[in-house]
Amino acid sequence: MRKLTSLFVFSFFSLSILAQSNSFRSSLNDYSDSYLYIDSLHSMINLEVVPRVFGASSLSKDDNLNAFLLGISLRAQINDKLKMIGIYDYLQGNHHNQIKSYQDSLNIYFPGYGLANSRYLYNASYRASKFIGLDLGNGKQFVGDGYQSLLLSDVASAYPYLKISTEFGPVKYYNLYTTFINPDVADYGRKKHATIHYLNFALTQNIHFGVFESILWQSKSEEVYKGYEFAYLNPVIFYRPVEFSKYSNKGNALIGANFNIKLFSNLFYGQLMLDDLNISRQKDNDENYQSGFFQNKYGFQLGFKGDLNNLSYLFEYNQVQPYTYGHRTILQNYSHMNQALAHPLGANFKEVIGVIGYKRSNWNYRLKSLVAFTGLDSLGTHYGQDIFQSDNDASTGGQYSYGNYNGQGVSTVILSLDAEVVLKLESVDVFGVISLRNKKSDLLDQTSVYYSLGVRNFPFTNFFDY
């Protein structure tokens, strides 16, 4: 693994010195900055207080459901260097079967909320100098340009973080220090720390490239208290060798790359993610070697999006191999508050996404389709989709698992289709949505169709893709 990591570093770093991507962003602004706000954050002088409202009624052949959200957003610009955002949301209602399934399988109240029906999000950003920015808060980050991210996504609950951004010419570099939680285990396994690096370069104005690194380790185990290993405060990227010399050499490391190329009004983008690679058994001429060793964990993304007059579009393909994002130590999987930190499907899937939007006057139209092919588990099995199980329990052979392939297990097709119409009024949006979900395999065939009508003054939905 050490030699493979060095090879990956050498190959991608030599390319990354040529290009840059501005794809590491906080999703806190997605919750606080709406097209309904007249004044942007940059134009504020003192303080802006905005109520947050969402309400929807959903009807199916079996249910009549209602959900509402009440919240408040406070945004302040203290001076030309210090900006602050604070958000509180309270969500309630009798939710539809998709949300109930999330509640039962992941033991969470609502996707992105964790265990409670309310959430606090905040951020204080300080521009220390022309080159350095500091962000402290409780929120989420997103790395990438697509609908999904295979590196770091914003589907999980908010977490505390410190982000340092450094910008010098064509170079942008981000250090993210944070703590994640495993809520359903004993105290010794609840907390895990992470250090994330993202290095960006610009080859031209239209070609960008970035390199990603994440190290996650358990704070405390039954054998030893590790705490926050201060060696990981080292701001230099590619310090995977440091991890080999620390207690956390049993931690979970991910590395990856992100790119985008702009051509006219189109953006071509993609990601490569490596969780683990182990070819040593083949290299050592292991007589029992077969293809599909379970420790060869990786994923990739390819997509393009753009705008044409009032029409916007996105088409994307994602693929992640079995057992990716998991770990032999369950407490060190790539998750927070029982939700994946990358793709919400976990691993062992192929996915195609299409999104088309159209704007005309005060009307917005949006059609989103998603088809995923995945291999799920039957009772007492582990074929690589569930990142919350130990790699050592792989049903294809435990730690000596060979012959793995994408989609193994209970072959399942997930279809998601959403058609939305929005009327933009002065202070709120009135929207209508038709949501179709179908999950089909040899063991089940579940279909649900909901018709929803509601109002909101910030982007929010109570329907999700899975």
Image (cartoon, rainbow, N blue to C red):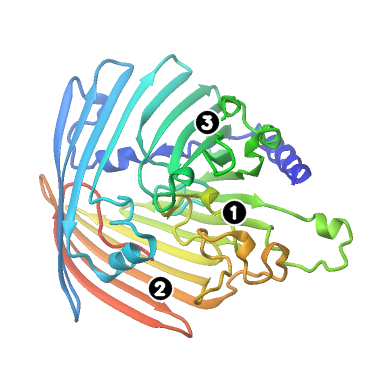
Dot 3 alpha-carbon crowd within 10 angstroms: few under 14, some 14 to 19, many 20 or more:
some
- Counting residues from the start of the chain, the first of labels 1 and 2 encountered is 1
- Circles 3 and 2: CB distance less than 8 Å? no
The nearer-to-camera label among 1 and 2 is 1
Asked if residue 260 lies left or right of residue 429, the reply is right
Residues at badges 1 and 2 in contact (C-beta under 8 Å)? no
Classify residue 136 by image quadrant: top left
Asked whether, in this view, residue 287 is left or right of residue 68, the answer is right
Numbered tag placed on residue 228 in the rendering: 3
Callout 1 secondary element: loop
User: To which residue does mark 1 refer?
Assistant: 327
| Vertical position of residue 212 compared to residue 436: above or below | above
For label 1, count other residues whose C-alpha is less than 10 Å away and answer few (under 14), some (14-19) or many (20+): many
Q: From what the image shows, is residue 449 above or below residue 168?
A: below
Secondary element type, mark 2? strand
Tell me which label, 1 or 3, sits earlier in the chain. 3
- Amino acid carrying label 2: it is Leu
* Residue labelled with disc 2: 415
